């Protein structure tokens, strides 16, 4: 079986009247004989799967990466069935027997074929979605899965759910998503600037583009934006810097064209981080792109020449288009009026810079080797987790409420001040992270070590009201017993 990806390039020569209604980059499964049907009979299973794939963008899976993942899952299942003489839409008895054998194959088969429990669960979820669709469309009469009824409880409201018994049980994740504590965050920020932990110049490091790296690193930590989101920002999408420094967060719109699921949202940033971006744009970036002759390589497609840009959009090859409609691939091909790439970060010569994973990894390795052996590996998404933890801490402890009170009588956005003062922490964090529901945010936070944040907020509020004992003294007393235990174990 062959997995290919649809491209409409040259469709005018295909002897069809209209461009096919297939999204660009959509996976297409082909049997080895390159046929989709056998005469007037029912369509082949591959044709049915292709129809299901084509409907994914309108069924809650708008991301092309999800389409490919779904296609590969079904393809591997079909190939396994074919090896054992079972059809994709066979009887329930044969499908259940095949699923049992497939589970054993993925759990204890050849090493390269084994799945972790989480990967197996994802595959079962995708196959379950496919079979339910196929049964609804009357292509299948049975599915290989057995379900049990369960009751999910959230915010005091229960609802009935179906649990797929084929999914392996896994231990509840705890602190499996890592973030940077404040001291390590400062180490990382200084490392991006080529500084030692004490703020002096790191004489053993001779890096380049330190202003760019520091500005974008601070931005990622201050906004919680995903790698794709901050990598493909354009200079004209950076909000204006307030006339005076402010402790209140500054709204930062995230364009729909670069977000996960193409959903527009507004996160926020700090005055310091936003000022760093503007300094980079006005000085280092301007000097790098001035007079640049950079053009995108031919494999990316034709250059998209930008003229008359403003905060909302610009003329692209003579046609007015809003920035928010541009995909990452299109943004990478944009050429600025003064020369060079239109992406926020550029490299020597004016081309777009996108290798943030490498920058963060090398910075982490240098800190670990030269200054702090315990320093963790920092990948771009760890900055998002760090933002989440710091923001939750500020929300729970009232930091933002206090900041809002200080600027209540100034020119601060009145709606934002009210939001900071009255918003529920989970709802605020949901909006900032771009989660579809607060349930997603709650599950996300369960994988972070939030116990400390709530404990310290409780202790601080209780101590301020005179309702609790001195928390520091209590912890110190507990530490004495911890030390005693450790000594006894030696």
Image: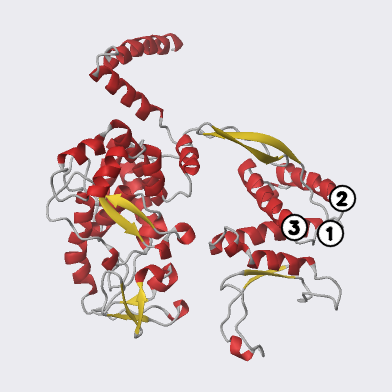
Residue identifier under label 2: 94
Residue identifier under label 3: 136
Q: Measuring from the top left, give residue 466's x and y in whole percent.
A: 24, 14
Tell me the SS state at disc 2: helix
- The quadrant of the picture occupied by the N terminus is bottom right
In front: 467, or 343?
Answer: 467
Color theme of the render: secondary structure
Disc on res. 87: 1
Closer to the eye: label 3 or 1: 3
- The quadrant of the picture occupied by the C terminus is top left
Number of numbered callouts drawn: 3
- Marks 1 and 2, how far apart in space? 9 Å
Q: Is residue 20 left or right of residue 304?
A: right
- Marks 2 and 3, how far apart in space? 20 Å
- Badge 1: residue crowd in 10 Å (few <14, some 14–19, many ≥20): some
Q: Measuring from the top left, give residue 460's x and y in whole percent.
A: 27, 22
Please tell me which residue is depicted at 58% across the width and 87% down the height of the picture: 10
Please tell me which residue is depicted at 39% across the width and 13% down the height of the picture: 482
User: Compared with residue 188, is residue 398 higher up or lower down, i.e. above or below?
Assistant: above
For the residues bearing labels 1 and 2, Cβ distance under 8 angstroms: yes
- Marks 3 and 1, how far apart in space? 18 Å
Q: Measuring from the top left, give residue 345's x and y in whole percent.
A: 30, 64
Please tell me which residue is depicted at 28% across the width and 53% down the height of the picture: 251
């Amino acid at each position: 079986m062959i997995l290919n990806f649809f491209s409409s390039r040259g469709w005018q020569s295909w002897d069809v009247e209209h461009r096919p209604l297939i999204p660009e980059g959509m996976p297409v499964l082909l049997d080895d004989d390159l046929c989709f049907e056998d005469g007037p009979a029912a369509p082949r299973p591959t044709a049915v799967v292709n129809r299901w794939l084509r409907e994914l963008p309108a069924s809650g899976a708008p991301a092309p990466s999800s389409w490919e993942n779904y296609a590969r899952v079904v393809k591997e299942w079909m190939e396994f069935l074919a090896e054992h003489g079972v059809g994709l839409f066979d009887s329930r008895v044969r499908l259940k027997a095949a699923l049992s054998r497939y589970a054993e194959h993925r759990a204890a088969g050849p090493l390269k074929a084994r799945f972790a429990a989480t990967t197996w669960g994802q595959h079962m979820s995708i196959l379950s979605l496919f079979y339910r669709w196929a049964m609804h469309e009357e292509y299948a009469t049975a599915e290989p899965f057995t379900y049990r009824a369960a009751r999910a409880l959230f915010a005091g409201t229960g609802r009935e759910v179906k649990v797929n018994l084929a999914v392996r049980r896994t231990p509840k994740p705890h602190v499996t998503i890592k973030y940077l504590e404040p001291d390590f965050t400062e180490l990382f920020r200084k490392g991006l600037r080529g500084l030692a932990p004490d703020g002096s110049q790191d004489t053993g490091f001779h890096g380049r583009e330190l202003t760019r790296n520091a500005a974008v690193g601070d931005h990622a930590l201050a906004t919680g934006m995903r790698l794709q989101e901050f990598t493909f920002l354009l200079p004209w999408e950076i909000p204006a810097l307030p006339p005076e420094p402010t402790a209140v967060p500054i709204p930062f719109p995230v364009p729909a064209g670069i977000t996960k699921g193409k959903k527009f949202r507004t996160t926020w940033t700090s005055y310091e981080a936003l000022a760093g971006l503007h300094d980079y744009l006005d000085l280092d970036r301007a000097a790098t792109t001035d007079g640049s002759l950079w053009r995108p390589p031919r494999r990316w497609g034709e250059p998209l020449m930008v003229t008359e840009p403003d905060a909302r959009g610009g003329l692209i090859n003579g046609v007015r288009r809003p920035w928010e409609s541009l995909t990452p691939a299109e943004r990478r091909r944009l050429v600025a009026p003064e020369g060079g790439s239109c992406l926020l970060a550029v490299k020597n010569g004016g081309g777009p810079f996108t290798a943030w994973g490498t920058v963060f990894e090398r910075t982490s390795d240098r800190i670990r080797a030269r200054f702090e052996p315990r320093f963790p590996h920092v990948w771009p998404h760890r900055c998002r987790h760090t933002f989440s933890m710091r923001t939750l801490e500020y929300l729970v402890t009232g930091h933002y409420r206090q900041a809002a009170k200080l600027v209540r009588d100034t020119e601060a956005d009145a709606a934002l001040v009210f939001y900071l003062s009255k918003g529920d922490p989970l709802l605020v964090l949901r909006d900032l992270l771009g989660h579809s529901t607060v349930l997603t945010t709650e599950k996300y936070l369960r994988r972070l070590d939030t116990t400390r944040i709530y404990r310290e907020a409780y202790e601080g509020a209780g101590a301020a009201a005179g309702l609790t004992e001195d928390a520091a003294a209590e912890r110190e007393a507990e530490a004495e017993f911890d030390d005693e235990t450790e000594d006894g174990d030696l």
